[in-house]
Structures are given as C-alpha cells and as structure tokens.
Image: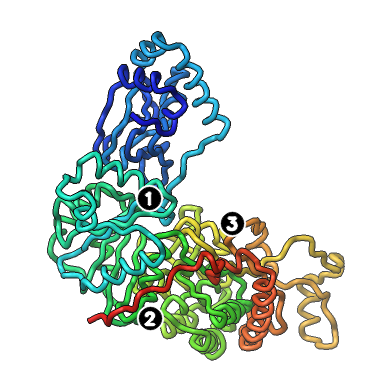
Amino acid sequence: MDGTGLLQTLTAAQRELLMAHAHRRMPRRGDVLLRAGEPSHVFFIVLRGVLAASGNGELTVYREVGTGQAVGELAFFCHGDQSETVTALRDCEVLEISHLAYAHALEADPGLAAAFLGLVAAKLHRKDGRRERRPGGQRRAIAFVRGGHEPVPPAFFERLRLRLRREGLVTLDRAVIADRFGGRSLGDPAVTEWLDRIEQEDAPVFYFGDDGLSDWTEFCLRQADEVVMVTSGDAPKAELSSVERLVEKLHPQSACRLVRLHRRRAGIVEGTAAWLARTPVFLHHHVSLQDNADVDALIRFLTGKAVGFVAGGGGGFGPAHVGVYRAFREQGATFDAFMGTSVGAAMLAGFAFLGEHDTLTAGTEDIFVKSRSFKRLTWPRYALLDHKAFDDALARVYGPETRVEDCWKPFFAIATNLSDNRMEVIRSGLLWQAVRASSAIPCVLPPFYTADGKMLVDGGVMDDAPLGPMQQIKAGPNLVVHFGRNGGQRFNVSYANLPGRGKLLAALLNPRRRLPRAPRLLSILFRTMLAHQRYDLPVTPQDLVLTPPAFAGANVMNFDRHMEVFEAAHAWAQREIETRLGNNDVATDAIFRRVAADQAPEQAPPMQAVA
C-alpha cells in the first residue's frame, strides 16, 4: 500500500502494521460514519473517495475530508463525544481504527504514538485545514444529466464539452472511460483510483451522464458533489423521471442546479416556476443555443468565476448605478448575477432581464418623474406617501406578471423581514413586488405584506451593501456600488434655535423668516436606517467596492435630475476604470476577467451551427 497523506508520515512497516489491525470499510454514498454528540469509539483515515463533516449533519455547508486525511481523531484521543457528523460523499474506501486496534498496533510499535500526536497537533495548530464547501462554491465533481422527459438537443452537450475543454477542464463520459480502461467495470480499482486522483486537482471534473438512467448515469450521480439537470421545453405534468428520482434521493437541494434551454435569448421567459416546483434546486440558469455566451456564463458559475453586481440603496442616488454599469459594459465587462437593496434592486432588476442603460433611464423617468411616485402625500395612517402610484408604475415598467425566476439572469432583491427580524433574500415571485418590498422605506411607504403574512420593509435596514449574501450564492468576483459614508459628520445647528410648532407655523407662513438649516425629517429617517451600517464588507481580493461621490442633482427623495446623476456617474466610473486598469488593480482585472498572456486559454475550435 502506497502512503498518502497521514500514512506518508509512517514507515512502510508501520503502515502495514496499522492495516493489519484496523478494519477496512467500503461505505456507499450517503452512509453516515460518525454522528455528532455520540461517544467516540473509532476514527477514520480516507484511502479513496471523499467524506463530508458538518456540525448539524446536513450537506449544505460542510468540510471536505479527502484521500489521506483523518476524521474523528480529536474526539477519539481525548475520549470525548464527536463534534461532527461524517457522511460519505461518494462510494469510498476508508480505514476504521478502533481503540482496540490502536492499542494492539501501539503495543507492537510504540513509535506510532508520536505520528498520531503529530497529526493531532497539526490539526490544532492549523485550526482546520479541511476545505469548506458550500452552495454556489466550487466543487470537486459535477454531473450533467437530463431533467424531465423531453430530449435535450445533443448540440448543447457538444458545445458544453468544447467550451469546458477550451478552459483546460476535464470532461468524462462513458466513451472516455471505455477508451482508457477498455472493458473494466466502473468499480474496478484502476478506474476508481484514477478518478480519485484527478478529482484532487483544484479544478472540478465534469461528468456527462447518458440520456436516461443507466449504470453510467448512476455512477456519475454517485461520484458528483453537484448535479446540473438540463431541461428542454415546458415542465411536464408527469411524475419525476427515474433520473430525477435518483437525483432527489442522492443529493440535497443545495447541491442541485437546473438549466432551461431556449432556442433564442429573451429578457423574460415563462414557465420557470413550474420547473422549480417540480425539481427544487439551489440555482437555475437560462441558456440559449444561439451562441456561446450563456454556456460560458454557466461554466463561470460552475468554476467559481461568475461576476456579480451588488447595488446598495440611496433613493435618488440610484441612477448612479446605471451610469457605473454602462461604463463597465463599454469596457467589455459582463455581469452574470445581480443583487440589490432598495433602489439598487430597482435598477438591477432591469439588467437581469437584459435591459441596458437606455431602458433603465426610461423606466426611472416613468416610475419616479412622470408618475410622481415620491411626491404623492397621503394621510399618515400607514405611511407618508400614497403607494398606489408607485405600485402601478413598477408593475407597468417591469410587467404585471413578470416573475423573478423568469428573468434571463439570476436576480435577488434584499428586504428586511420584520415578522421574523431577519434579512429576506427574495429570489422568486412577481418582479415588481420584489422591487417594491426591497424599496419599502419605513414610514415613507407602507410595508409590503406577502401572501404568507410576512411584513417586509426596505432592505437597507438590514444590509445596504449585500456583498455577503451574494457570496453565499456564488463564488467569483463582484462589483459593489454603494453610497454609504463613514461617520464623523458634524452639524452646525443650535438646538435652542429649533422652533416649536407655533413659531414653525409662523415661519412657514412668512417667507421672509428663515428657519435653522438642520436636517429634515426624511434625511433623519434615512440616517437612522443606516446608522448600524459600518460597510466593513467581507471583501476578497476579487471584489471591487466603489463609493461614488455625491453628484450634483442627487437627492434621496427626488429623481427629477436623474439623467444628470446618471451622466455624472458614468463619467466618474470611466475615470475610475481607466485609473484602476492602468494600476493593474487586481479586483478590477477580475471583473474584466483579464489574465496574463501566458495564462490565456487556447483558441477554441470553430463551432458548427446549432440546429
């Protein structure tokens, strides 16, 4: 037996001694080896395959235990209870070491104690060197299978293979295994050991299942950490296919994606909600076969390189998001996912259904200027403003029946859930209602009430720059635009000179009398909403955070000069991009996916037309 990982620290004689006393096990995918809270009687060393360790036993977020690594050893040596539940992520081979086996091996060679002491000390020193896996992050192995009952155009899989290989990624199907291993079975040690070895590389391995359920398709599903179900046409009313049932059995929702294929790209499609009700998944993607753009975007999601746009709130400052977006698009940036708070959600929703800056500026004019949405006062029983004009304008601009799920690109709106006192990430339902809930400024507009009774208000109360939530949905670079300012502002206001109601009314009736220059009601409300925001965002080297200055014409509650704000932000962003690219800024390069010449992928072979 060759040494790997922990076993490499042992001599050949010690390895043979340990193997002689320990128990060799072959757990199947889904088998639980250790349970959190139970007394520790054994620990394991992985010889082949992957285990998942998590505190709650769920496979949503877990730490990966790969070949050569040990698990359960801390509780084993201190005679305590297990702190994690350990589950086989695929068919594995492990070495189970009990107290009796360890005692016998130690009796034969006391030197084993030093090796295992080093193992425990190294883990405590590193805290936890195991790689964390979470939904939306990079995986070891990803399987593509057909969802539903309609046939999937072979051209999609052919194109996907070519684009993956162009990126230097490994693609495997039945033919590849047959060519390499001849008539060997899928369970042959030569096959499984080779797969285990290539899956230990940094880049994921992509498995392509057969058209239906077969021994190879089942092998792919058992080998994969994430499954992509590729569908064509409308969601069938028939029961789940045999492949879909096996996916449901083997994989949690957090490890599943859905791809809907379309002949042509469209800003808004129909019928996605029916697919998601049939096969709940973590994330879905719309892919057109008219070119490679959507296939490449899907690959970026699967390899942890998808580019996100995160937009904060700010009322009348919101058109600046559109100016920044235009400047980046002009320089060749492509955004794969959008997440916004308040007016940021209102702006990014348009980009999610493939609108450009002219679409957004026209929509802003309709919603905020022509309809006078933020100028219609009402009797302040539920709010200061009459929300009906705002609601009607949102439904008119985004479409009364347009759903979040049917936007071509993934879109998420952030709201504050006052029913459960938490942040709400809105990822389904009517698009205009998602924007309305995210923009429900407390006291200014009534809260938005959902069909299941949740009261939602402006997302800025909880997270005005939702970079963290975006990172929970996908890996890769993000552009974050927010208007938050650091504290420290001082006000030259004499508190004693603030008038009571009598003097205030008299001053309002006499235009010659001046009132103290102090912040007004809505300004104070906005400052109060954002008082807890510190903007110490969880920024990675690939995240670019921009805070545009206060442009002339920008006013929190007034959009009349939105074109001036848009144009000023566009010009400012152009200068920012030029400066940052000139300085080889890492985050800016990541947004534009710039790589060094020696890292550039090879030229792709010419593509044939897709029928």
Is residue 417 something that shows in the picture?
A: no
Residue 200 coordinates in the image, percent (x, y):
39, 46
Q: Which residue is mark 2?
A: 267
| Position of 591 relative to 63 (above/below) | below
Q: Earlier in the sequence, mark 1 or mark 3?
A: 1
Q: Which mark is residue 140?
A: 1
Q: Which residue is mark 3?
A: 540
Residue 138 coordinates in the image, percent (x, y):
42, 54
Question: Which numbered disc, 1 or 2, marks the residue closer to the eye?
Answer: 1
Query: Disc 3 residue type?
Result: Thr
Identify the residue at image location x=50%, y=61%: 476
Identify the residue at image location x=15%, y=60%: 212
Query: Disc 2 residue type?
Result: Gly
Measure the alpha-carbon separation of dots 2 and 3. 31 Å
In the image, 29: left or right of 127? left
Q: Which mark is residue 153?
A: none
Q: Earlier in the sequence, mark 2 or mark 3?
A: 2
Residue 420 coordinates in the image, percent (x, y):
46, 53
